[in-house]
Each structure stands twice: as structure tokens, then as C-alpha cells.
Image: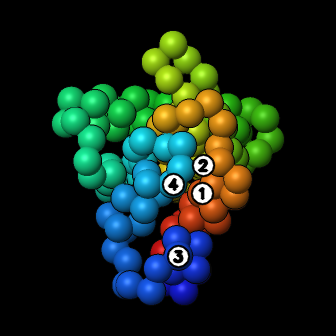
Amino acid sequence: QLMFRAVLGTDQVLTPQDIVDHCAAFPGLKACVLLQLDAILTSRGMDETDAAAFRASAVKTRDSLVTLAETMGLGQGGNFTLRTDHGIRSFFLDSNLCLAVWHAQPNFSGGTREKLILIAQELSKS
């Protein structure tokens, strides 16, 4: 909790849903999905159709990226940013966890990528 509070700039007790919502609110991002074992959390505030599509694509993309990471000798971890005609999405893989974000602008704002890496690493420990 202490690390989450420091990175997210809050002193409230955070649930996993709160963490996902805070990540989506970082400058330059519009949505976040957390894939943990069998649990999937999507940031609140998205249109439900967009949220469902993002969740579904995040699951499939995570599976492909885990295979790619293993092929590249990274184990099951790694950070990937994919640029497509449907937008830019970044995936932070750590153990059995994937934190995926949907960009609202082409590049991360200062420190945002690093915060997401730390959050994914900390979530994978819990």
C-alpha cells in the first residue's frame, strides 16, 4: 500500500479498482485494464462497448506478448507499446499479471511509464 500511495500521490487506502482508475487518470491516458490470474478490472468512466472491446483485446494481446517475451528471452515479463490504426496501447507484463493502458496521446508524459512499471511490479507481488 505504501508504494501505491507514494506513486499515485494519495493517502487513502487503495483497492485494486482504485489503482486501475488512478492509472487511467495519468496524463495522456484514457483507460486501463488489469489482468490478474482470472480477474479482470477495467477503469471506470469508459463507454461500456469500448471497455468490453478493450478488455477482450487486452486478454488476447497479453497472451501473444507473453509468447513474444518468452521467444525474446525475457521470461514472461516485459513492457510493450503497440501502435495501430485503432490507437496506441501499452502492456506491462510481470509474472501472471498484465497492466494495459490505452493512450490518449502518442507518448507518455514524464514519469508515467516508470510509474506504470512500478505499479505492475508491486501488483504482481500481491
**Few, some or many C-alpha atoms within 10 Å of disc 1 (few <14, some 14-19, many ≥20)?**
many
**Few, some or many C-alpha atoms within 10 Å of disc 3 (few <14, some 14-19, many ≥20)?**
few
Residue 99, image x and y in percent? 50, 51
Q: Distance between the residues labelled 2 and 3?
A: 21 Å
Residue 92, image x and y in percent? 60, 49
Disc 1 residue type? Answer: Leu
The numbered mark, 2 or 3, whose residue comes first in the sequence reads: 3
User: Which residue has dot 1 on it?
Assistant: 116
The circle on residue 9 is: 3
Which residue is located at x 38 percent, y 77 percent?
A: 14
Residue 11, image x and y in percent? 45, 86
Q: Distance between the residues labelled 4 and 1?
A: 10 Å
* Mark 2 vs mark 3: in front: 3
> Can you see residue 67?
no
The circle on residue 103 is: none
User: Which residue has dot 4 on it?
Assistant: 26
The numbered mark, 4 or 2, whose residue comes first in the sequence reads: 4
Disc 3 residue type? Answer: Gly
* Mark 4 vs mark 2: in front: 4
Q: 96 or 24, which is in the foreground?
A: 24
The numbered mark, 3 or 4, whose residue comes first in the sequence reads: 3
The answer to whether the residue labelled 2 contacts the one labelled 1, judged by CB atoms less than 8 Å apart, is: yes
The numbered mark, 3 or 1, whose residue comes first in the sequence reads: 3
User: Which residue has dot 2 on it?
Assistant: 92
Q: Distance between the residues labelled 3 and 1?
A: 13 Å
